Structure formats: structure tokens, C-alpha cells
Image (cartoon, rainbow, N blue to C red):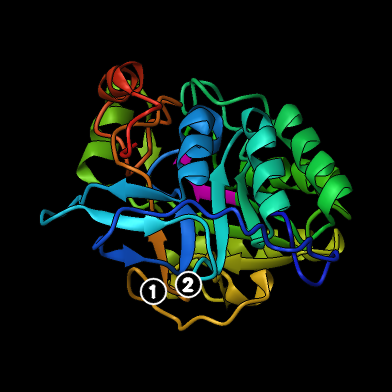
Amino acid sequence: MLALGFRECQTRPPRSSRWTIVPPNAQIIAVIVSASYRTDIPAFYSEWFLRRFEAGYARVVNPYGGPPTQVALRGPGVDGFVFWTRNISPFRSALAKVAEAGPPFVVQYTVTGYPRPLEPGVIEADRAVAAIRALAADFGPRVAVWRYDPIVFTESTPAAWHAANFARLAAGLEGRVDEVVISFATLYRKSIRNMTAAGLSWTDPDWPEKQALRQTLEAIAARHGMTLTICSQTEAGGTGAACVDAARLGVKARQKGNRPGCLCAESRDIGAYDTCPHGCVYCYAVRSRSVAKRRFREHDPASEFL
């Protein structure tokens, strides 16, 4: 699901020369930095990010095994940032620091407005819409990309509900964003387990039904001045999304998607799975909310690792 410093939106301040030197002989990867599709760093880990940004690098555990990676956060090799969040408010001071340093950034901001059983820890949709409007006022309408994803079908959120809910949110964001990204929920085993434990009755419609809803949402988005794109799901038709969008950042980077159909530019993520306490029951990045809340409590903002 944050952006500041767009080259096409504002004059960039000069880059600071006060880069912190990272440890010698460190293997540093520096491209577009993703923070983070594995967890909500802006909502929960702003102090850690600020410390790592001042240090100039972060270390990242490899979730698939192997040695940890060191990712540069400052310096000429950092092409820009993509921040993913459902609540940017705790991160505004961090955005100011990134803006002062100069690298461009984008905010992928998720606002779905789902019933509480689906998203028990997420801020109210009206608050999130107001935060996006404030971002646009500060940095222009290309700083934030609205994410209405994943689309989850339950007894309380059928296709007709999504159409009405999407239209209400789009009206509030008109003129403040120019793109909305959607996707349909992929129900992994842990997602099914968590939704069942929450007492939710869910369905996974066939692609023709999803395509019909995509077309409905696409028309609504267009009426409000937005392009609707689809994240990594060619079966849904329509226009594919580049969530890590080098063009929007105003930089050059090779395309290197994370899965089939992904149009993202190459990036390095600095987050960690099982650390987001929002508690969204459909989330692919969290085994259980209790695990995520425990890891959040144990988090050390002074650590090199999240």
C-alpha cells in the first residue's frame, strides 16, 4: 500500500553531502528501496527507519534463507523510495527527512474501508483519505497511489458492496491521486485459516465475475480522473500495474517483477514478514496477528535489522 520529491512535481533540493560511511567491505545493494511490502514500516516502525536512514543503510534478513543483505538508504546509489502503508501519519517526520536529503519517493497507500472483522487494526477509511489529501497538498497529486487491494469477497463484501464502497472512496480522493491499483485476494492457506478463525464466510469467484467487477471499478475510477491498474493478475484484464514505478519516481531502472505478470522495477525490500500488527485476516505476510504483535513488542529500533 508514499511519495515525496517527485522530479516532475517540484524542484528537488540539493543532495546532502553528509552521507554516513557504511562499514568497510560490506556488500551493499542500492537501487529503488521498498519499505515495505512485507510490513507497514510507516505505521509502526518510523523510529527504526529514521535511525537507519541517518546511518545510511539497513540490514535485511533473507526470508528464503542465506546470508543477510545490506541495503544502502542514502547516497548516490539510492535511486528512490517506495513506501507502502495504511497509515502515513506516524511517518511524516521521516518523509520530511527523506525530502530534505533529496531522493524521490512514492507512497503506495492502501485504503479499503472494509468491515472490522476483516481489518481489526486499520485506521478508519475517512482518516486515511484525509491523509492522502494532505500528502497531495504538500507534494502534489502524483506522490500517492491509492491501493484498493486485495479485493475480498465475503457475505458482507460482495461485488455490489465493493462497487458502492469504491465509488465513495474515489469521490473523496478525486484530484488527489491519478492512479488506483487493485488486485483480487489470493487465498493462501494461512489466509483461509485466519479468515475461518474470524468466523468469516468467504468466496473466490471465477475470473469472469472478477473481470466484470474490474470493469465496473475501472469506469468509476475514470469518472474521478484516475487510471485503474491491476497488480500481477493478467486474468483480470485491463492495464497492468507497476507498483514500484521507475517512471513515476523519475528514475531509470530495469523491470524485474516479483512474480508472473508483475511489472515492477527492480527494488530491494527492507522489511520483514510477521511484523505487521494491523491484523488484516487476509494478509499474505503474517501467519497470525499474535505472532506479529509479539514481534512488534520485541522490536528494537536501534537494531540494524527491522
Q: Image quadrant of residue 239?
A: bottom right
Q: Is residue 173 left or right of residue 52?
A: right
Placement of 97 over or under 244, stated as above or below: above
Secondary structure under the numbered disc 2 in the rendered image: loop
In percent of the image, x 46 and y 50: which residue is there? 56
Secondary structure under the numbered disc 1 in the rendered image: loop
Placement of 32 over or under 119, stated as above or below: below
Residue 1 is at least partly visible in this image:
no
Q: Which quadrant is home to the C terminus? A: top left
The image position of residue 295, as x and y in percent, is 28, 23
In percent of the image, x 30 and y 48: which residue is there? 59
Q: Is residue 14 left or right of residue 202?
A: right
In percent of the image, x 30 and y 35: which residue is there? 286
Residue in the foreground of this view, choosing between 16 and 83 = 16
Return the residue at label 1: 257
Amino acid carrying label 1: it is Gly
The image position of residue 299, as x and y in percent, is 33, 23
Residue in the foreground of this view, choosing between 265 and 205 = 265
The reply to whether the C-beta atoms of the residues labelled 2 and 1 are less than 8 Å apart is: yes
The image position of residue 91, as x and y in percent, is 63, 34
Amino acid carrying label 2: it is Cys
How far is the residue under mark 2 from the one under mark 1?
5 Å
Q: Image quadrant of residue 258?
A: bottom left
Of pointers 2 and 1, the one earlier in the residue sequence: 1
Q: Is residue 83 left or right of residue 171?
A: left
Residue in the foreground of this view, choosing between 112 and 270 = 270
Return the residue at label 2: 264
Q: Which residues are magenta?
A: 148-153
